[in-house]
Image: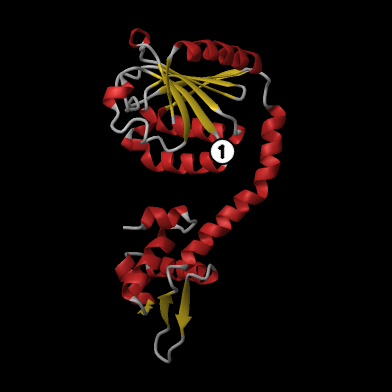
Amino acid sequence: MYQNILEDLGLSPNEAKIYETLVEKGESSISDISVSAKIHRRNAYDAIERLVNKGLCFQIFSSKENLYNAVDPGKLMELVDEKRQSVESILPDLNKKFHRRATTEEAFIYRGIEGQKNIWRDMLRVGEDVLGIGAKAQWYDPVIAPARESFFKEANRKKIKFIQLFDNEVLKKVPNFPKHFSGKLDYRILPKMYSTQSTMHIFGDYVVTYTGIKEIGKMPDDPFIFVLKSADLADSYRTWFRYMWEQSSVGHR
């Protein structure tokens, strides 16, 4: 039941099976473990020894047959913390290498829901206000709710402001607009004749364009997100944004 999660923490398939068996059954002999976990006895010995070394189970000495038991499952969180610490220890060097090779101008495509998460990570990393043109509240699709909530929590901590030009249809099709918006928002509404199936965000040196957004408040099933990184281009779009902002209906929160 928990096999995949335990393996993600670094346990081998046999280790995961045995640990789950011991959590469920408690004190068990090698014979019982081998049968319950459906693992050859020799392989069970090897896996249990590794679990003992990892601190996830312990041996109970007996005059007959030694028994084994699992430690408190809370120990698993220590494995998570250790992995996190390992990643954090190499992040500074990886970031240096990443930014050192980053080109001044580049263009690429993100795809799918994971692509949207990448955009949010870029926004948090840049840490500047986000301008939006043709916004359609697609971020509020329930499919990406957990990631969205995490993003806005960090965006609010960094005091990132969202200055958005929304499509006219958002007023009627998004319940409680704009009270549902989780971040610091300043917005205006585009005239109805300028509604499209695209959305654009500008932040830092980035210009991000979504296409094929056919429904207000919903992400496309497999969105394509076109990303341009260019300081000059981003500044140009900010200039055009200001003109559109001045021509649009006032609304703010």
Q: Quadrant of the C terminus?
A: top left
Name the residue nearer the viewer: 217 or 102: 217
Q: Position of residue 179 (x, y in %)?
A: 37, 35
Q: Position of residue 18 (x, y in %)?
A: 39, 67
Q: How is the image coloured?
A: secondary structure
Tell me: residue 229, above or below residue 46: above
| Residue carrying label 1 | 159
Q: Position of residue 71 (x, y in %)?
A: 45, 74
Q: How many marks?
A: 1
Q: Residues within 10 Å of mark 1 (few under 14, many from 20)?
A: some
User: Which amino acid lies under the numbered mark 1 shown in the image of this protein?
Assistant: Lys
Q: Quadrant of residue 107?
A: top right
Tell me: residue 218, above or below residue 4: above
| Residue at (42% x, 78% y) in the render | 68
| Residue at (34% x, 30% y) in the render | 177
| Residue at (35% x, 58% y) in the render | 2
Q: Is residue 251 left or right of residue 130?
A: left
Q: Quadrant of the N terminus?
A: bottom left
| Residue at (67% x, 40% y) in the render | 94
As helix, strand or loop, the secondary structure at mark 1 comes to: loop
